[in-house]
Image (cartoon, rainbow, N blue to C red):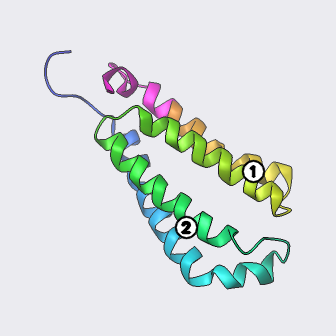
Protein backbone atom coordinates (compact mmCIF):
# COMPACT_ATOMS: atom_id res chain seq x y z
CA UNK A 1 0.00 0.00 0.00
CA UNK A 2 1.33 3.42 -0.93
CA UNK A 3 1.20 6.36 1.43
CA UNK A 4 0.70 6.45 5.18
CA UNK A 5 -1.41 3.90 6.96
CA UNK A 6 -4.93 5.01 7.80
CA UNK A 7 -6.87 4.26 10.97
CA UNK A 8 -10.52 5.20 11.34
CA UNK A 9 -11.66 7.60 14.01
CA UNK A 10 -13.87 5.02 15.70
CA UNK A 11 -10.97 2.57 15.99
CA UNK A 12 -8.73 5.32 17.37
CA UNK A 13 -11.39 6.29 19.92
CA UNK A 14 -11.91 2.63 20.91
CA UNK A 15 -8.17 2.09 21.44
CA UNK A 16 -7.95 5.23 23.57
CA UNK A 17 -10.94 4.02 25.60
CA UNK A 18 -9.25 0.62 26.05
CA UNK A 19 -6.07 2.29 27.29
CA UNK A 20 -7.89 4.56 29.74
CA UNK A 21 -10.28 1.88 31.04
CA UNK A 22 -7.56 -0.70 31.57
CA UNK A 23 -5.15 1.76 33.17
CA UNK A 24 -7.92 2.76 35.56
CA UNK A 25 -8.84 -0.90 36.08
CA UNK A 26 -5.25 -1.77 36.97
CA UNK A 27 -5.07 1.03 39.55
CA UNK A 28 -8.47 0.16 41.04
CA UNK A 29 -7.68 -3.56 41.23
CA UNK A 30 -4.32 -2.80 42.79
CA UNK A 31 -5.79 -0.42 45.36
CA UNK A 32 -8.99 -2.30 46.06
CA UNK A 33 -7.95 -5.92 45.65
CA UNK A 34 -8.87 -6.81 49.21
CA UNK A 35 -12.29 -5.22 48.78
CA UNK A 36 -13.03 -7.72 46.01
CA UNK A 37 -13.05 -10.46 48.64
CA UNK A 38 -15.93 -8.70 50.38
CA UNK A 39 -17.90 -8.45 47.14
CA UNK A 40 -17.00 -11.92 45.90
CA UNK A 41 -15.83 -14.05 48.83
CA UNK A 42 -15.20 -17.01 46.52
CA UNK A 43 -12.33 -15.39 44.61
CA UNK A 44 -8.89 -16.79 45.34
CA UNK A 45 -6.12 -14.55 46.70
CA UNK A 46 -4.15 -14.72 43.45
CA UNK A 47 -6.96 -13.27 41.34
CA UNK A 48 -6.64 -9.49 42.01
CA UNK A 49 -2.94 -9.37 41.07
CA UNK A 50 -3.67 -11.37 37.91
CA UNK A 51 -6.46 -8.93 37.02
CA UNK A 52 -3.95 -6.09 37.42
CA UNK A 53 -1.53 -7.91 35.12
CA UNK A 54 -4.24 -8.50 32.50
CA UNK A 55 -5.18 -4.81 32.58
CA UNK A 56 -1.55 -3.80 32.09
CA UNK A 57 -1.21 -6.27 29.23
CA UNK A 58 -4.35 -4.85 27.60
CA UNK A 59 -2.79 -1.36 27.72
CA UNK A 60 0.31 -2.79 26.03
CA UNK A 61 -1.82 -4.54 23.40
CA UNK A 62 -3.72 -1.31 22.63
CA UNK A 63 -0.45 0.60 22.23
CA UNK A 64 0.83 -2.17 19.95
CA UNK A 65 -2.34 -1.87 17.84
CA UNK A 66 -1.56 1.83 17.46
CA UNK A 67 1.80 0.64 16.11
CA UNK A 68 0.01 -1.65 13.61
CA UNK A 69 0.98 -4.96 15.28
CA UNK A 70 -1.44 -7.76 14.45
CA UNK A 71 -0.23 -9.95 17.33
CA UNK A 72 -1.77 -7.45 19.75
CA UNK A 73 -5.29 -8.42 18.64
CA UNK A 74 -4.53 -12.04 19.48
CA UNK A 75 -3.19 -10.87 22.83
CA UNK A 76 -6.52 -9.16 23.51
CA UNK A 77 -8.33 -12.39 22.67
CA UNK A 78 -6.15 -14.40 25.06
CA UNK A 79 -6.58 -11.81 27.79
CA UNK A 80 -10.37 -11.76 27.38
CA UNK A 81 -10.56 -15.55 27.50
CA UNK A 82 -8.38 -15.62 30.62
CA UNK A 83 -10.59 -13.00 32.29
CA UNK A 84 -13.70 -14.95 31.32
CA UNK A 85 -12.28 -18.15 32.82
CA UNK A 86 -11.33 -16.30 36.00
CA UNK A 87 -14.81 -14.80 36.28
CA UNK A 88 -16.35 -18.24 35.96
CA UNK A 89 -13.94 -19.62 38.57
CA UNK A 90 -14.88 -16.77 40.92
CA UNK A 91 -18.56 -17.61 40.64
CA UNK A 92 -19.59 -14.81 38.30
CA UNK A 93 -22.50 -15.91 36.12
CA UNK A 94 -21.98 -17.32 32.62
CA UNK A 95 -23.80 -14.45 30.91
CA UNK A 96 -21.81 -11.80 32.78
CA UNK A 97 -18.60 -13.67 32.02
CA UNK A 98 -19.43 -13.84 28.32
CA UNK A 99 -20.13 -10.09 28.21
CA UNK A 100 -16.39 -9.51 28.44
CA UNK A 101 -16.06 -10.87 24.91
CA UNK A 102 -18.17 -8.03 23.49
CA UNK A 103 -15.14 -5.76 23.58
CA UNK A 104 -13.23 -8.20 21.39
CA UNK A 105 -16.13 -8.32 18.92
CA UNK A 106 -16.22 -4.52 18.75
CA UNK A 107 -12.46 -4.35 18.26
CA UNK A 108 -12.61 -6.97 15.51
CA UNK A 109 -15.40 -5.10 13.75
CA UNK A 110 -13.50 -1.83 13.90
CA UNK A 111 -10.32 -3.46 12.60
CA UNK A 112 -12.32 -4.85 9.66
CA UNK A 113 -14.15 -1.62 8.79
CA UNK A 114 -13.07 1.07 6.40
CA UNK A 115 -11.23 0.97 3.14
CA UNK A 116 -8.51 -0.04 3.43
CA UNK A 117 -9.20 -1.95 6.62
CA UNK A 118 -6.88 -1.42 9.55
CA UNK A 119 -6.43 -5.20 9.64
CA UNK A 120 -5.06 -5.26 6.08
CA UNK A 121 -2.50 -2.61 7.04
CA UNK A 122 -1.21 -4.43 10.11
CA UNK A 123 2.17 -6.08 10.34
What segment is highlighted magenta in the picture?
Answer: 109-123
| Position in image of residue 102 (x %, y %) | 64, 43
Residue depicted at x 86% and y 56%: 93
What residue is shown with label 2? 52
In magenta stretch: residue 76: no
Label 1 CA crowd tier, 10 Å (few <14, some 14–19, many 20+) = some
Q: Quadrant of the N terminus?
A: top left
Label 2 CA crowd tier, 10 Å (few <14, some 14–19, many 20+) = many
Horizontal arrangement in the rendering, residue 23 relative to residue 84 (left or right):
left
| Position in image of residue 42 (x %, y %) | 85, 72
Q: Secondary structure at mark 2?
A: helix
Horizontal arrangement in the rendering, residue 87 relative to residue 3 (left or right):
right
Above/below status of 32 relative to 123: below
Horizontal arrangement in the rendering, residue 49 relative to residue 7 (left or right):
right
- The outermost residue toward the front is 46
Horizontal arrangement in the rendering, residue 40 relative to residue 15 (left or right):
right
Instruction: Please give the label number shown on residue 69.
Output: none
Instruction: Please give the label number shown on residue 85.
Output: 1
Amino acid sequence: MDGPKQRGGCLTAWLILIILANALGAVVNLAMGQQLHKLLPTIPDWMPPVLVALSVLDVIFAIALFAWKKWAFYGFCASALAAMAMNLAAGVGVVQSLLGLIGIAILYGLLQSGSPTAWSQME
